Image (spheres, grey):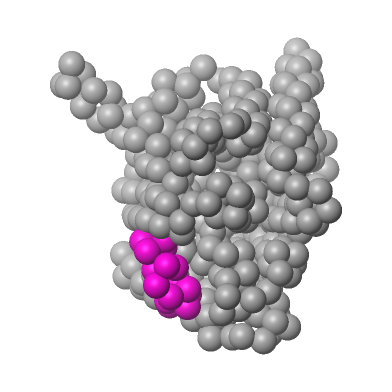
């Protein structure tokens, strides 16, 4: 039995390019230091900072605005200057800005530097996504993105568990760790990954005649992005309003909240690759995405259950982790398969912008809703939005099928 499990894991991880593995290692180092974002609302509402939940919501919203701007220019400059250069600049620049942000105490300065940090930091995502698609071997696109997500979530597991310990001791250290790991990832990229040729498109006869279509005119892709926005609007609550619910309503400690984040990452690491290996061959991307949204909706509803806060929160983490596994890898595959080497940065940027817009509006509106009502109302609303998004992805599947018929 154990040999069959080992064989299953070996098969799931086989066939990926060495550059894909290196990019995932860089992502692992980078995300192992990702401790600021999931603890940002806790940091700003702590006794030392003493800002309100809505103040914190505005800061997170500015992080989202900066992310959208950074994603746009990151995608634009990726197509123009290459994914290598943009990744390097973003990692080092973002690392420096993380350290600076941790030293600031004045609210308006925190707002300004949060925006600047997210602008520089988020330019990394379309460049990195383009790099993964560029280096993926044929037939391994979904698994290449899943390996990258595995690195992100393994980093979350490490960062979340240590972040909880560090936050319980000193919130400001989180910014130093995040900054230094960003810079370390940039150094690794510079040393071990060669910059592609000036024209970083793979030479290929079919590629030369592929029409250069605009992502902005791809109607089905625009529908797809709207439904991604609905999903991301709700999913970001896991790292913004939900930690406050865990602390203030379920009376969980920062250490336990960090452990929950680590469990979320651990589930992704343990199960996503082997599930994706068996699922990607069935070509049911939008069906899997819709199923993932339903599971995430059930995750938020589970927070309304009575009982021990420790167990209720754990159930929520299991459900939302399962939803991630079904939804996120196939979202990446959907846009990657619609793009080519000359417009991939544009497609990646628009996908990142959809997430950034959700990060801008989600925490801000959700904190306002909580202050006007309570967390129970928020969780009902989030579950409803996710069910609407699931129906939207299913509708898009039917629309795509008819257009190809």
Q: Quadrant of the C terminus?
A: top right
Residue 178: x %, y % from top left: 44, 70
Q: Secondary structure of the magenta portion, mostly?
A: helix
- Residue 107 vs 16, above or below: the answer is below
* Residue 109 image offset from top left, x and y in percent: 68, 85
Residue plotted at (67% across, 86% down): 106
| Magenta-highlighted residues | 162-177
- Which residue lies at the image location 72% right of the left edge and 21% below the top edge? 394
From the viewer's perspective, tell me whether residue 339 is left or right of residue 89.
Answer: right
| Picture mark count | 0
Residue in front for this viewpoint, 176 or 218: 176
Q: Is residue 163 magenta?
A: yes
Report the side of 211 relative to 11 (left or right).
right
For the residue pair 77 and 168, the one nearer the viewer reads as 168
Task: Choose between 58 and 119: the one closer to the eye.
Answer: 58
Quadrant placement of the N terminus: top left
Determine if residue 345 is in view. Answer: no
Position above or below: 403 against 242: above
The residue positioned farthest toward the top in the image shown? 405
Q: In this orientation, does residue 101 appear?
A: yes
Picture coordinates of residue 372, whole percent (x, y): 83, 53
- The residue at 65%/53% (across/down) is 241
Q: Does 395 appear in magenta?
A: no
- Placement of 274 over or under 81, stated as above or below: above
Q: Residue at x 59, y 55 (%)?
A: 248
Q: Residue 33 location in percent, x, y?
A: 41, 65
């Amino acid at each position: 039995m154990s040999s069959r499990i080992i064989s299953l894991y070996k098969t799931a991880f086989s066939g990926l390019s060495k550059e894909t593995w290196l990019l995932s290692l860089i992502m692992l180092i980078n995300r192992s230091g990702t401790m600021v974002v999931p603890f940002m609302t806790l940091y700003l509402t702590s006794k030392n900072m003493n800002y309100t939940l809505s103040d914190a919501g505005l800061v997170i919203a500015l992080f989202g605005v900066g992310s959208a701007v950074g994603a746009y220019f990151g995608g634009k400059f990726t197509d123009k200057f290459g994914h290598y250069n943009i990744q390097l600049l973003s990692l080092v620049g973002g690392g420096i800005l993380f350290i600076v942000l941790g030293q600031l105490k004045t609210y308006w300065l925190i707002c300004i530097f949060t925006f600047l940090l997210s602008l520089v930091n988020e330019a990394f995502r379309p460049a990195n996504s383009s790099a993964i698609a560029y280096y993926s071997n044929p037939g391994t696109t979904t698994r290449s993105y899943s390996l990258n997500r595995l690195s992100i979530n393994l980093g979350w597991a490490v960062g979340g568990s240590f972040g909880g310990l560090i936050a319980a001791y000193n919130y400001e250290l989180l910014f130093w760790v995040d900054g230094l790991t960003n810079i370390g990832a940039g150094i690794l990229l510079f040393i071990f990954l060669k910059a592609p040729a000036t024209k970083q498109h793979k030479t290929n006869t079919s590629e030369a005649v592929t029409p250069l279509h605009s992502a902005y005119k791809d109607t089905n892709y625009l529908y797809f992005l709207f439904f991604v926005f609905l999903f991301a609007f709700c999913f970001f609550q896991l790292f913004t309003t939900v930690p406050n619910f865990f602390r203030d309503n379920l009376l969980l400690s920062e250490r336990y909240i960090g452990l929950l984040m680590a469990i979320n990452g651990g589930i992704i690491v343990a199960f996503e690759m082997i599930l994706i290996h068996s699922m990607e061959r069935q070509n049911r991307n939008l069906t899997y995405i819709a199923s993932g949204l339903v599971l995430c909706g059930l995750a938020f509803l589970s927070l309304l259950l009575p009982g021990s806060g420790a167990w209720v929160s754990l159930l929520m983490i299991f459900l939302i982790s399962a939803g991630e596994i079904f939804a996120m890898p196939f979202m990446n595959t959907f846009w990657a398969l619609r793009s080519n080497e000359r417009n991939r940065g544009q497609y990646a940027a628009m996908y990142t912008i959809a997430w950034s817009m959700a990060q801008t509006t989600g925490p801000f509106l959700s904190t306002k809703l909580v202050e006007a009502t309570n967390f129970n109302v928020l969780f009902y609303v989030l579950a409803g939005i996710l069910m609407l998004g699931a129906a939207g992805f299913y509708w898009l599947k039917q629309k795509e099928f008819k257009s190809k018929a």
